[in-house]
Image (cartoon, rainbow, N blue to C red):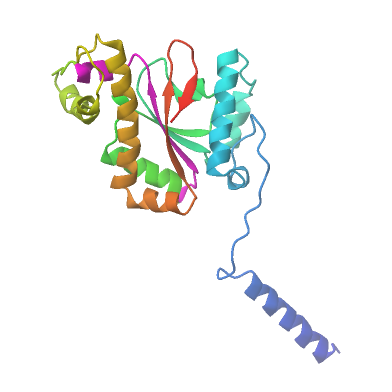
Amino acid sequence: MKNPFIILAATALISSSAVLASDDSPAVTKVTPYKPGITMTKSVQAGISPDDAMNILKAGNERFVSGKPLSRNQKTLVTQTALGQYPLAHVIACMDSRSGPEVVFDMSTGDIFSNRVAGNVINDDILGGLEYGSKVVGTPLIVVLGHTSCGAIKGACDGVKLGNLTQLLEKIQPAVQMSKTPGERNGKNYKFVNEVTELNIDDSVNEIRTKSPILADLEKQGKVKIVGALYDTSTGRVSWR
């Protein structure tokens, strides 16, 4: 006959284990150290701070500029990320064919969220995507990536009117109006265009903070960093703002 005291003890131990494993207990996320080229998983993302993510992108851009990109097995990355994604950064970039974030930061499948629109402007749909990326998926860094010699910026400087493009370029007008660069205020004035480009990046960063209380709160908590950056189409180098 089984000892009733042993049965009671075993029952108590099982009950205690169930309580410790209940949904009310704080979840412990395993952390896997980041290494260049590693597949982004939940455990890898968990160990990356906003500043870490920024440094990873900086290192990636250095590899791109030096012509030494990482060698990756794309088929393996596709398989490993098939059931989920945990990017380390969210990049809002221009649609320009020369400034693809995955290329200029030497990133790959599963590494970054990429929203691309002419002039890297901000709208409600992009904000929704950013909120999903940071609040739901846990992406710690948001980058507004502008670039030199931007056709959208030049179009805004020249006051171009063309179908649906007109309303897009209107979003860049605040930067055009803020520019103090002397000389002709059009797309032929290189210094004027450059200043408007930088002001537009800053304006987009500010719009994210002011139009999304969710992201502003995450930034205040130190869980997310929102920054601007400028890609130089003549050198391939990204400078940070």
Looking at the picture, how far across and down is residue 179, in whole percent? 25, 24
Instruction: For residue 181, say whether it is visible.
Output: yes
Give 196 or 116, whichever is nearer the viewer: 196
Looking at the picture, how far across and down is residue 26, in whole percent? 59, 65
Q: Give the range drawn in magenta.
A: 136-157
Give 236 or 91, whichever is nearer the viewer: 236
Residue 124 in the figure: left or right of residue 23: left
Going 43% across and 52% down the picture, which residue do you hit? 220
Instruction: For residue 120, say whether it is visible.
Output: no
> Is residue 217 positioned above or below 203 on the image?
below
Going 62% across and 35% down the picture, which residue do you hit? 39
Q: Looking at the rendering, in which quadrant would you find the C terminus?
A: top left
Looking at the picture, how far across and down is residue 139, in whole percent? 49, 43
Going 59% across and 43% down the picture, which residue do you hit? 48
Q: Looking at the rendering, in which quadrant would you find the N terminus?
A: bottom right
Give 41 or 36, whichever is nearer the viewer: 36
Looking at the picture, how far across and down is residue 172, in whole percent? 23, 27
Residue 137 in the figure: left or right of residue 38: left
Going 55% across and 15% down the picture, which residue do you hit? 65
The answer to if 147 sits in the magenta stretch is yes
| Number of numbered discs on residues | 0
The answer to if 153 sits in the magenta stretch is yes
Residue 76 in the figure: left or right of residue 232: right
Quadrant of res 151: top left
> Is residue 219 positioned above or below 12 on the image?
above
